[in-house]
Image: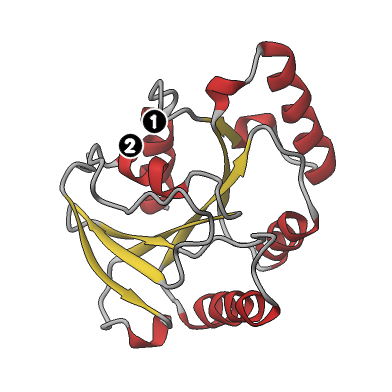
Amino acid sequence: MINFKNTRFIKSLPSIKLKEDDKLKEVLFVGRSNVGKSSLLNCLCDNKNLAFVSSKPGHTKLLNFYNVDQKFYLVDAPGYGYSKSNISEINLFSEMMEDYFSNTFNLALVVFLLDSRRKLNEDDLQLINFFKEENINFVIVLTKADKLNQSQRYQITHHIKDTLNINIDDMIFTSTLKKENIDKLKKSIEYYLKK
């Protein structure tokens, strides 16, 4: 069992190449700006002060590394798709992600966050298709699920299932407000770390 409470921030880096070489596996958190990555990370690790939660989207600019119980690194990537981001910031994100995926050898899982109230856009599809093409393990986490009723959950679930041709079981609805499915996400992470 992994003690997610035993998590500490290690460092922020512009490139995975600058990370000290060790054997710990990595779990990457990635998603659009304002999807709730920091809030979910804090909820997952039961520490509201672990990751900075900004009222403005696009706050995270670097790869943030957290050591979880000496078992793995949780890597928080910058959000993408913030409408006020300029072209240079968008290119910087693309370059950072290309660098990360090209140079990490310990990636066990991508936790791909989607706002449960939003349909997939072109950026989402490009990333997910990339994961599929490269055989990268990923789970889809639908954030802010407390804002949806059952009908809305059904609609977004089937929109994603039909668009991506994936199994409904590969989607996890979460709510940091109600702590919904946080344990399910932990179990999913632990499963992929053992593979």
User: Horizontally, is 129 left or right of 11 in the view?
Assistant: right
SS category of the residue bearing label 2: helix
Instruction: Give the quarter of the figure containing the N terminus.
Output: top left
Query: Is 125 located above or below residue 184 in the figure?
Result: below
In this rendered view, identify the residue nearer to me: 98 or 26.
Answer: 98
In this rendered view, identify the residue nearer to me: 26 or 120.
Answer: 120
Query: Is 126 located above or below residue 114 in the figure?
Result: below
- Tell me the residue at 53%/61% (across/down): 58
- The mark found on residue 43 in the picture is 2
- Tell me the residue at 64%/33% (across/down): 116
Type of the residue with mark 2? Cys
User: Horizontally, is 75 left or right of 110 in the view?
Assistant: left
Marks 2,1: beta carbons within 8 A: yes
In this rendered view, identify the residue nearer to me: 85 or 43.
Answer: 85
Q: Position of residue 114 (x, y in %)?
A: 62, 43
Q: Residues within 10 Å of mark 2 (few under 14, many from 20)?
A: many
The outermost residue toward the bottom is 17
The residue at which mark 1 appears reads as 182
